[in-house]
Image: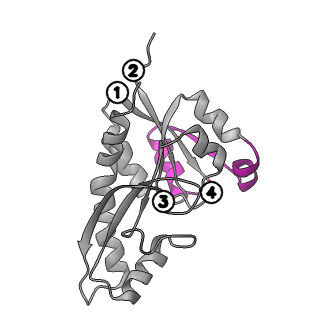
Amino acid sequence: MSKSVKNIAILASGAGSNAQKILEHFSDRMDISVRLIVSNKQEAGVLNIAKVASIDTFVVTRDSFYSSTDLLVELNKRNIDFIVLAGFLWLIPPYLIQHYPDRIINIHPALLPKYGGKGMYGHFVHEAVHLAKDNHSGITIHYVNEKYDEGSIVFQERCEILPSDQPEDIAKKVQVLEHLYYPTVIDQLVSSLPL
């Protein structure tokens, strides 16, 4: 029997607003399914989102993530084809990248290559953009490699920043773009994968 469903795992560290939008996007699809939500925080809000949606969860410790292949076992158990990072703050280990070449993507809340790298996430990014007095910010969706925010870019979209915008205002504008575009780009990439 040939496999007809492509399965996604979402890795997230926080509240999970992007994960929620991704779940909503694929909720009535027969060809693509979110099968697993992984977090590195036991108390992450994204785990509650998974529970409500009846999706399996798996919590990784730093040790298990980097020193074992426990996560790989969980991914294989569910025939995961594609991994989506949605606010996951740890660097992805080489074994995972090798197992999923060009099948792991991340969304960054700025226009890479600006404002990327270790420590550049969430409000730190928006504060840096604000301090630089940039008149645009946006989102970058990119493949994941062994360095923070350096994988090849799949998609970018920008938003205008007004001189009066504070970091919180920039964050809101960027989040609108995240919620609007991330599920669609994931859909295009996963749909184009060979079964």
| Numbered mark located on residue 167 in the image | none
Using the numbered discs, state the Cα–Cα distance from disc 2 to disc 1 in whole angstroms. Answer: 6 Å
| Amino acid carrying mark 1 in the image | Asp
Asked whether the beta carbons under mark 2 and mark 1 sit within 8 Å of each other, the answer is yes
Q: Amino acid at mark 2?
A: Ser
Q: Residue tagged by mark 3?
A: 15
The CA distance from mark 1 to mark 3 is 27 Å
Could you tell me which residue is drawn at 51 percent across and 73 percent down?
120
Q: Point out the frontmost of discs 1 and 3.
A: 1
The answer to if 41 sits in the magenta stretch is yes
From the top left corner, tell me how far across and down residue 111 is, in percent.
36, 69
Q: Which residue is under mark 2? A: 4
Q: Position of residue 143 (x, y in %)?
A: 45, 51
Q: For the residues marked 2 and 3, what is the alpha-carbon distance in whole angstroms?
A: 31 Å
SS for dot 3: loop
- Measured in 3D between alpha carbons, the distance from the residue under mark 2 to the one under mark 4, in whole angstroms, is 32 Å
Residue bearing the label numbered 1: 31
| Residue at the (47%, 43%) spot, across then down | 102
Answer left or right for 22 relative to 37.
left
Tell me the SS state at disc 1: loop
Q: Identify the mark nearer the N-term, 2 or 3.
A: 2
Q: CA distance from mark 4 to mark 3?
A: 10 Å
Residue 47: percent from the left, percent from the top?
53, 49
Of the image marks 2 and 1, the number of the one nearer the N terminus: 2
Say which amino acid is labelled 4: Lys
Residue drawn at (38%, 81%), measured in percent from left and top? Answer: 129
Which element type, helix, strand or loop, lies under badge 4?
loop
Q: From which residue to which does the magenta span run?
A: 40-68
